[in-house]
Amino acid sequence: MTQLRQDVVVSVPNLVFLVDVDDTLLDNDRVRVDFEAQLLDAYGEEGHAAYWEIQERRFVELGYRGRAGSAALVLEVDKTPPPELIEKVTRDCGISPERLTIVLTPTTSLAGNVQVVGRVLEVALHKVHALHFPLDRVVDGAGSAPVPPPAHDFLTGMGRTNDAIIYGGTVHLYVTGPDEDARKLAEDLPSSRSRDYGKPFAETFKAYKGDFYAIDGMLFSPARVIVSNLESGRSFHAGAVNEAMLDTSFGYEAKS
């Protein structure tokens, strides 16, 4: 089956509110037709047919579907999102446009840095899922990562925020089940297990000619991991913070 890009991150510099656009300023049916046409152009017949099935399957796979009367969307982009994107978000969330708050955080801003490194636990859970460890056995978790200095350009900024997690992030997970499963999760989860570990992310991104999805997905995980088994009381840890790589990525001057 065609592999679709499912976790695209975007961001923006200005706050936009659209009010009363549901089937008035925007024609929902035409928006969907246009969206599906773009899917067809980008991914072909197979990808177009698979998109909606993949989206629904993910809800079933995770066993979770949230419901709320309002939503907040944080975007890491440098231009305003098109009305079609906002309409899709409100439609998929089942809310009216005035119940959607959009927070725009450019990659080169301090806010952009904070919202990316703040996802360190989320990144770890994504890899937990990729490693096929049952998510229902993850009871709780906590994480931290350093906030890098804002960069003057997008590529450097993106590199620094990714490096903050890959080389500086620490996550502590609390799980249930056999000790051996907890031990293996701790061993497999750190970013150092990836074939692409060892260079600043900006360099890795350029080496793959800007193809984000050609990079080893196992790289996107915290540097250091602790997994505690709530049933046995034992904890397992692996990985380490790479301060030298952080200094290089963040542009810190060498100590004299």
Image: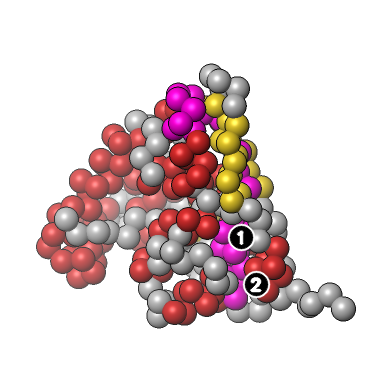
Label 1, label 2: how many angstroms apart (C-alpha)? 10 Å
Of mark 1 and mark 2, the one earlier in the sequence is 1
Look at label 1 and name its amino acid: Tyr
- Residue 5 screen position, x and y as percent: 32, 60
Look at label 2 and name its amino acid: Ser
The residue wearing badge 1 is: 167
Check the picture and name the quadrant holding the N terminus. bottom left
Check the picture and name the quadrant holding the C terminus. bottom right
In the rendered image of this protein, does residue 68 appear above or below residue 6?
above
The residue shown at (55%, 26%) is 229
Query: Could you tell me how many numbered marks the image carries?
Result: 2
Judging depth in this view, the residue of 145 and 65 nearest the camera is 145
The residue shown at (66%, 56%) is 241
User: Seen in the image, is 25 located left or right of residue 39?
Assistant: right
Name the image quarter holding residue 254: bottom right
User: Seen in the image, is 140 located left or right of residue 44?
Assistant: right
- Residue 148 screen position, x and y as percent: 69, 64
Tell me, yes or no, whether the highlighted magenta stretch contains residue 84.
no
Q: Magenta part of the protein: which range? A: 156-182
The residue shown at (49%, 33%) is 182
Judging depth in this view, the residue of 133 and 31 nearest the camera is 133
In the rendered image of this protein, does residue 66 appear above or below residue 113?
above
Judging depth in this view, the residue of 29 and 8 nearest the camera is 8
User: Seen in the image, is 250 located left or right of residue 194?
Assistant: right
Looking at this rendering, what residue extends furthest in the left direction? 45
Assign a secondary structure to mark 1: loop
The residue shown at (60%, 22%) is 233
The residue wearing badge 2 is: 249
